[in-house]
Image: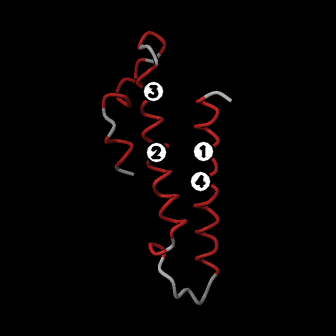
Amino acid sequence: MSQASQLGTRSYLIEMYGSMQEYVSQNQSDNNVSESSDPIDRKVAEEREAVVKDLLRALRSISRVNMEPSSESFVSNPSFFLSY
């Protein structure tokens, strides 16, 4: 499996987990455990950060000749992605 395919799969799984967690928290009336205390949630948050960093690394590895004119700003300003 290529690295780009793995990155896409990891990103998809993280987003699906986030969507399911959001659904569960909206439909669960008796939530006594805070979200930050769940070790799985912490691991997912760490993986989300790793996916963003890997995506930035992949974007930096693409030659500027092969990029569209406006894509340079994504590579030059990594804090743009981390602000969301």
Q: Residue furthest top?
A: 65
The x and y percentages for residue 4 are 59, 30
**Amino acid marked by disc 2:** Ala
Q: Mark 2 near mark 3, Cβ–Cβ under 8 Å?
A: no
Q: Residue furthest right?
A: 1
Between 59 and 36, which is closer to the camera in this rendering? 36
Between the residue at mark 2 and the residue at mark 3, the CA separation in whole angstroms equals: 14 Å
Mark 4 residue element: helix
Between the residue at mark 1 and the residue at mark 4, the CA separation in whole angstroms equals: 9 Å
Q: Which residue is mark 4?
A: 15
Q: Which residue is mark 2?
A: 50
Label count reads 4
Between the residue at mark 4 and the residue at mark 2, the CA separation in whole angstroms equals: 13 Å
Which residue: 45% across, 54% down? Answer: 46
Crowding at mark 2 (Cα within 10 Å: few <14, some 14-19, many 20+)? some
Above/below status of 19 relative to 37:
above
Tell me which corner region of the image, top left, top right, bottom left or bottom right, holds residue 20. Answer: bottom right
Above/below status of 36 relative to 50:
below
Between the residue at mark 2 and the residue at mark 1, the CA separation in whole angstroms equals: 10 Å
Crowding at mark 3 (Cα within 10 Å: few <14, some 14-19, many 20+)? some
The x and y percentages for residue 7 are 58, 37
Tell me which corner region of the image, top left, top right, bottom left or bottom right, holds residue 2. Answer: top right
Q: Mark 2 near mark 1, Cβ–Cβ under 8 Å?
A: yes
Q: Which residue is mark 3?
A: 59
Between the residue at mark 4 and the residue at mark 3, the CA separation in whole angstroms equals: 20 Å
Crowding at mark 1 (Cα within 10 Å: few <14, some 14-19, many 20+)? some
The x and y percentages for residue 27 are 64, 80
Q: Which residue is mark 1?
A: 10
Q: Nearer the viewer, mark 1 or mark 3?
A: 1
**Amino acid marked by disc 4:** Glu
